[in-house]
Amino acid sequence: MVRPRNFILSALILGTSAMAAPETIGIFSTWAVFRDGFGCRAVAEPDSPGRSGASRPFASISFLPSRGVRGQIALRFARPKRPGSAILLRIDERTFQLIGGGADAWAPDARADAAIVAAMRTGVAMSVETRSDTGGTIRDLYRLRGAATAIDAAAIACLR
């Protein structure tokens, strides 16, 4: 189920300021697209019941023209990860290793970003897993229906 107000909160979590309030470009199944003063993002929340933790988990694909960023993946967990724990991102049968710290994760380089975004375009589901700082497992599942359209919409919105 799409929860537009939750997507807006997620966009705000990404660090936008009051002067750069996000503009909703569109909602595509479980993915939403926002534009702000920094760039454009396709954003989704995990397909799971309510979470407890310090932050709201989400996945985003960013386009930041002023920084030359195109299709950069970022994920946030509800709780910080354990230092040194692997972060595994699975899209259908493909597995990618991410890097990160605290409650955040990202691809190690632009080549990995491109491979992940390509897999997202044709994938059905994406999961990310790591160990929390308390030793439990953090596992978030994202549905990829609408992701390709949202990624394209974010890229186009930042061309203008």
Image (tube, rainbow, N blue to C red):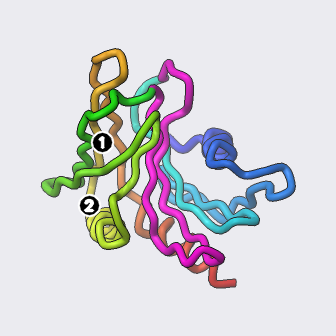
Residue most toward the right? Answer: 19
Q: Residue 148, percent across and down?
A: 41, 68
- For label 2, the residue is 123
Task: Say left or right for 56 vs 92.
Answer: right
**Type of residue at label 2?**
Gly
**Type of residue at label 1?**
Val
Q: Residue 128, percent across and down?
A: 30, 42
Q: Residue at x 16, y 57 (%)?
A: 94
Give the CA separation, mark 2 to mark 1: 14 Å
Q: Residue at x 27, y 34 (%)?
A: 84
Q: Residue 26, percent across and down?
A: 63, 62
Mark 1 lies on a secondary structure that is strand
Magenta span covers which residues?
Answer: 51-79
- For label 1, the residue is 128
Residue 66 on the magenta span: yes
Answer with mark 2 or mark 1, whichever residue precedes in sequence: 2
Q: Residue at x 70, y 65 (%)?
A: 38
Mark 2 lies on a secondary structure that is loop
Residue most toward the front? Answer: 84
Using the rendered view, name the quadrant where residue 124 is placed: bottom left
Q: Identify whether 118 is placed above or below 95.
A: below
Task: Say left or right for 59 vs 17.
Answer: left
Report the number of discs: 2
